[in-house]
Amino acid sequence: MDILQAIILAIIEGITEFLPVSSTGHMIVASSFFGIAHDDFTKLFTIVIQLGTILSVVVLYFKRFFQSLDFYYKLFVAFLPAVFFGLLLNDFIDGLLENPITVAISLIIGGFILLKVDDWFGGHDDGTEISYLTALKIGLFQCLAMIPGVSRSGASIAGGMTQKLSRTTAAEFSFFLAIPTMLGATVKKSYDYYKAGFELTQDQTYLLIIGNVVGFIVAMIAIKSFIGFLQKHGFKLFGYYRIIAGAIILIIHFFVKPLIII
């Protein structure tokens, strides 16, 4: 991985992490185009730079993190399903992370769901309280995103809307839930690589720093833009985007060149 590839991947991560379009799917496809998807450092890079993006949530919603202990308890309850299923399905998930076909199919199916999610579950106001049971259900929905291409934010936002939360409330809770989820994934994956004897070079350390800084800046812009757009327009545009992106990936893979050479 060179510095330009690192910056491009970080921009993609910053834009897509909190949008319902699947950051993991986009990162898999981009790294496949670069021909570095199989590289161990690339896999570590795509996880570790999530630290920069989750820091953007802390900065943008700084005051919300001091509102009550109840806020943290609910995040913890929502986080538990990811811990359980992440550990249980770790090897299976790793096997999917290099498969662009899985990404494409997930993007298309998720796209059709986003076209209808406002009709099915929209129209709720911001007064609905997030209970512990609601938090747990959102956490279960988030686990669907362990399949590349599903979208962590999309799954958790849709999960929140099924529990009568407004689009904005569901999206913001999804942002907050990203912090323990992505932090946990980063620590787990970093430990796995350390245990396997993987050592970072100085150049790789610099790339991780650059990736986190770029991801942080881009994610700040993406979050603020997304909330404003979501309040006015809903999810349909993201649904169309996912369907088109998934179709393009399939066309390129089968008719131009395989995105992954096994």
Image (cartoon, rainbow, N blue to C red):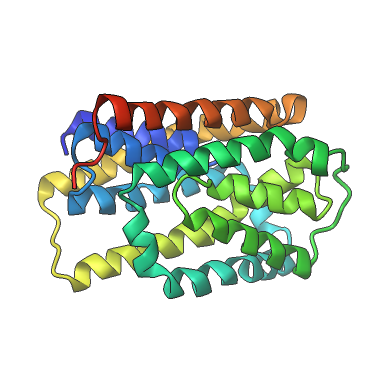
Which one is in front, 47 or 53? Answer: 47
Farthest residue, direction front: 255
Q: Position of residue 127 (x, y in %)?
A: 89, 48
Which one is in front, 89 or 251? Answer: 251
The residue at the point 27 percent across, 38 percent down is 31
Residue 188 in which image quadrant: bottom left
- Judge from the rendering whether residue 119 lies leftward or rightward of residue 18; answer left or right: right
- Judge from the rendering whether residue 53 lies leftward or rightward of residue 165; answer left or right: left
> With respect to residue 24, does 190 lie above or below?
below
Q: Position of residue 47 (x, y in %)?
A: 35, 52
> With respect to residue 111, does 152 lie above or below?
below
The residue at the point 68 percent across, 59 percent down is 138
The residue at the point 51 percent across, 39 percent down is 107
The residue at the point 59 percent across, 57 percent down is 142
Look at the image and tell me whether residue 170 can be seen.
yes
Which one is in front, 174 or 245? Answer: 245
- Locate the N terminus and report the quarter of the image it occupies: top left
Which one is in front, 71 or 138? Answer: 138
Q: Position of residue 69 (x, y in %)?
A: 70, 69
Count up the numbered dots.
0
Look at the image and tell me whether residue 58 can be seen.
no
Residue 112 in which image quadrant: top right
- Judge from the rendering whether residue 52 lies leftward or rightward of residue 127; answer left or right: left
Q: Position of residue 241 (x, y in %)?
A: 55, 26
